[in-house]
Image (cartoon, rainbow, N blue to C red):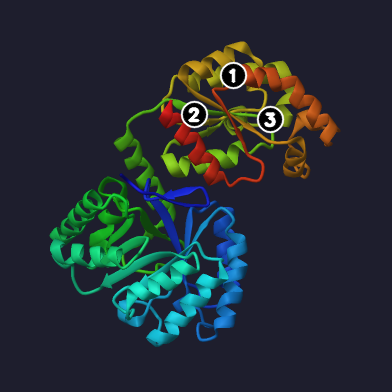
Amino acid sequence: MENYIEKKGYQIGKRPLICVPVVAAKKTAIVEQVSRLARENVEMLEWRIDCFEGINDTKEVLEVLKEIGSLCEQTVLLVTYRSKKQGGEGVLGSEAVKELLLEIAACGCADLLDVEYMETEEPEAFFAALHEKNMCIVASHHDFLQTPYTEEMLEILIKMRRAGADIVKIAVMPVELSDVAILLDTTAEFRKKYPQTPLITVSMGTMGILSRICAESFGSCVTFGADACVSAPGQMNRHQLEKVMNLLHGAIKGESPNIYLIGFMGVGKSTVANALRRQSGMEIIDMDEELEKRAGRTIPSIFESWGEEVFRELEHALLKELAQRKGCIVSCGGSVILREENRQLMKQSGTVVQLTAEAETILERVKEEQHRPLLQGKKNVEAIEVLLAERRPFYEQARDVAVVTDGRAAGEIAVEILDYIGEH
């Protein structure tokens, strides 16, 4: 039976997450990069503390960790100290590293902590100490010289597992192309024998890029994509990596019915659609954005120049077109459910998910936005509640399932939706 580790709505060990390393030296650069990546809904970040210029000052490390941890509300945060011996910048002694990692675990701001298995004395006892602080451990080993035989790599992975690691990781350097195949074969074999233990495997360098993009096929639960700077040889740009992995995921899973996200403005359709895309690999179609692109003007301008009825006809025509497609996440306009024809189209061609939120939540999300014609002069809780009440019967007729979004991470909501679809 497979085992998944739940972190911030993501299931580590299911579909591979893309982890983006942060290797800046200065605090300001680290915070700025993490803030930007978190706003862009990156699934997972790795802060390489060995690259931080303040690594010798535990207090300074923890201050930065607390600050970036607060930014990663919906992003899994992995903290890694990589020694020189294992390919990093770290020169701390083994006891100093242990003390630092224990302080990081006690801080409670990291979701995962990388521990170099081969560089840690008595790893079982150290892992137990970290577990006492509720820390999730990624035990790692890097070989920058070669790719060992499958038997040797399996032995290392099994030792890390037996020592108590929650996730095991091995990264090796290929000397020839056949080495990449050896690494992938090792990944698949370990996954088959120990499906309850998530693992990360990487074949480094340009020769090993294949291992980074086909993680899903062989069982690796995380792959690494670069933002500004790479942290290891062969890392692809994160945007390119995401595109390739999504294409492969679609091919692996085959075409599936559409997912239609409906709900009042401000319930989080666009945000949840992006989270679904990251976890499913499906293409997103935002109906309002597509209509604006085709009309060459904004939604408020369409309303003002052509009238609401023309807008509804354009919306219906687009929905008919989308209903003929497969494997799309469709973020619907707030009023698409008003027409019976639209409700039937969605029901017949996919799963209809209504996202809900309280009027107070909706107001907080849309109060600064100027592109909501329906709320002109009505940006208050009472007016929103009236509109919600008017549309409630239409949502109930259209939906297959309703999902609450108040106070929840988009990744968590996406998992709930995909689980529902999988069960039905």
Separation of residues labelled 1 and 3 (CA atoms): 13 Å
The picture places residue 171, in percent across and down from the top left corner, at 28, 66
The picture places residue 339, in percent across and down from the top left corner, at 64, 14
Q: State which quarter of the image contains the C terminus.
A: top left
Task: Give the amino acid type for the residue marked by disc 2 in the picture.
Answer: Ile
Residue at the top extreme, as displayed: 341
The picture places residue 135, in percent across and down from the top left corner, at 47, 65
Badge 1 or badge 3: first in the primary sequence: 3
In which quadrant of the rendered view does residue 378 lie?
Answer: top right
In which quadrant of the rendered view does residue 32 lie?
Answer: bottom right
For the residues labelled 1 and 2, say whether their Cβ atoms are less than 8 Å apart: no
Separation of residues labelled 1 and 2 (CA atoms): 13 Å
Separation of residues labelled 3 and 2 (CA atoms): 17 Å
- Residue located 49% across and 20% down the image: 321
- Residue located 72% across and 43% down the image: 365
Residue 362 lies, with reference to residue 340, above or below; the image says below
Horizontal side, residue 217 vs residue 287: left or right: left
| Mark 2 lies on residue | 259
Residue 109 badge: none
Task: Give the amino acid type for the residue marked by disc 1 in the picture.
Answer: Ala
